[in-house]
Image (cartoon, rainbow, N blue to C red):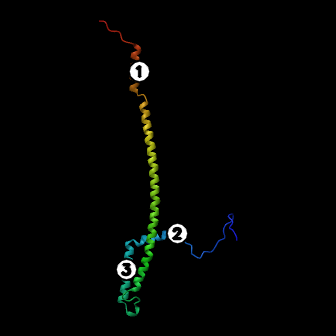
Amino acid sequence: MTTERLDQPRDLRRQLRPHYDPEAFGRLSERIARFLGTARFLVYMTVFVSMWIAWNALAPGHLRFDPYPFIFLTLMLSLQASYAAPLILLAQNRQDDRDRVQYEQDRETTDRSQAEIEYLTREIADLRMSVNEVVTRDYLRAELSRLLDELRGPEPADSD
């Protein structure tokens, strides 16, 4: 029985399944889903189906490849829908992930902003309290006048 050593890298093993880049596949699925949701796609699909039906209804019998019930057309449209649905869901899931990350970033920014606002509010309140304790010019003049009057003492009464 051999044990793997942790100080050496593992041997590379061949995998039978193909390797793909999930990010690139996700971007491709978003582009496809974005295209499937456009008027251009609807126009292309309508022209394609119309031409298919017209060819198979109006062409000479030996050139028709999908006669009237158009089973092959139905099969192709079902196949297209079976691929489109998971691609659209994948694109929506990726968008949901981006929205979730954006929401978290917005929430963190809001929390930081709220903390900064609370800090600035406390600082402004502290400044207001400090300013209230500062002697104003008018208050100082009034106090100096009162002290000067006390030092001069009572004025002698006028004798007329």
Distance (Cα) linking label 3 and label 2: 33 Å
Closer to us: mark 3 or mark 2? 2
Identify the amino acid type marked 2.
Pro
Mark 3 vs mark 1: which is more N-terminal?
A: 3
Which quadrant of the rendered structure holds the N terminus? bottom right
Across and down, in percent, residue 74 comes to 40, 83
Distance (Cα) linking label 3 and label 1: 98 Å
Q: Is there CB contact under 8 Å for labels 2 and 1?
A: no
Q: Which mark is residue 47?
A: 3
Residue ranking furthest to the left: 160
Across and down, in percent, residue 108 comes to 47, 53
Q: How crowded is the residue under tag 3: few (<14 C-alpha within 10 Å), some, or many (20+)?
A: few
Closer to us: mark 3 or mark 1? 1
- Is 11 or 36 nearer to us in this picture? 11
Mark 2 vs mark 1: which is more N-terminal?
A: 2
Distance (Cα) linking label 2 and label 1: 82 Å
Instruction: Give the residue pinned by disc 2.
Output: 22
The residue under the point 41% across, 73% down is 36
Across and down, in percent, residue 25 comes to 50, 70
Identify the amino acid type marked 3.
Val
Instruction: Give the residue pinned by disc 1.
Output: 144
Q: How crowded is the residue under tag 1: few (<14 C-alpha within 10 Å), some, or many (20+)?
A: few
The residue under the point 47% across, 66% down is 94
Q: Quadrant location of residue 3?
A: bottom right
